[in-house]
């Protein structure tokens, strides 16, 4: 079960990072990170009480996946020459 949840979190994190960057622009790292984490938790396909439990048990994982997604997004920007 956790592996499926983790897979969903990884996909949501990629979207979350792109959305946060688009809405908030450069800088504002902490705001973007919070926005991305909120996006991931909001869009998990579970009831709110279960999302709360997931956020407690997988908070470190969610944080790491957001950071990895940011690095991934930055490599895309470098490839485009931005």
Image (tube, helix red, strand yellow):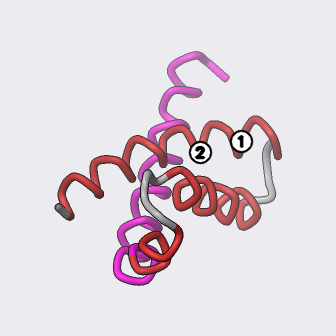
Residue in the picture at 53% in, 47% down: 70
Q: Is residue 41 magenta?
A: no
What x and y, as percent, mark residue 72?
A: 45, 39
Residue drawn at point x = 48 percent, y = 58 percent: 67
Query: The C terminus is located in which quarter?
Result: top right
| Disc 1 target residue | 21
Highlighted range, magenta: 54-82
Residue lying farthest to the top in this orientation? 80
Q: Is residue 25 left or right of residue 70?
A: right
Please tell me whether residue 79 is drawn above or below residue 12 in the rendered image: above
Callout 1 touching callout 2 (CB < 8 Å): yes
Q: How many marks?
A: 2
**Quarter assignment of residue 77:** top right
In this picture, residue 18 sits left or right of residue 47: right
Q: What is the quadrant of residue 33 in the picture?
A: bottom right
Left or right placement of residue 11 versus residue 2 in this view = right
**Residues at marks 1 and 2, CA–CA distance in whole angstroms:** 6 Å
Residue 81 covered by magenta stretch: yes
Q: Position of residue 50 (x, y in %)?
A: 42, 73
Image location (x, y in percent) of residue 44: 46, 54
State the residue at coordinates (53%, 69%).
48
Q: Secondary structure at mark 1?
A: helix
Identify the element where label 2 is drawn.
helix
Q: Which residue is mark 2?
A: 17
Q: Quadrant of the N terminus?
A: bottom left
Residue under the point 43% across and 59% down:
46
Left or right placement of residue 2 versus residue 50 in this view = left
Q: Majority secondary structure of the magenta segment?
A: helix
Disc 2: CA contacts within 10 A as few (<14), some (14-19) or many (>=20): many
Q: Position of residue 16 (x, y in %)?
A: 58, 45
* Position of 73 relative to 58 (above/below): above
> Mark 1 packing: few (<14 Cα in 10 Å), some, or many (20+)?
some
């Amino acid at each position: 079960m956790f592996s499926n949840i983790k897979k969903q979190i990884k996909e949501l994190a990629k979207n979350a990072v792109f959305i946060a960057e688009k809405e908030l622009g450069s800088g504002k790292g902490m705001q973007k990170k919070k926005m991305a984490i909120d996006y991931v938790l909001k869009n998990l396909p579970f009831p709110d009480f279960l999302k709360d439990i997931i956020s407690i048990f997988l908070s470190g994982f969610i944080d790491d996946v957001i950071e990895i997604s940011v690095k991934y997004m930055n490599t895309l920007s470098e490839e485009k020459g931005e």
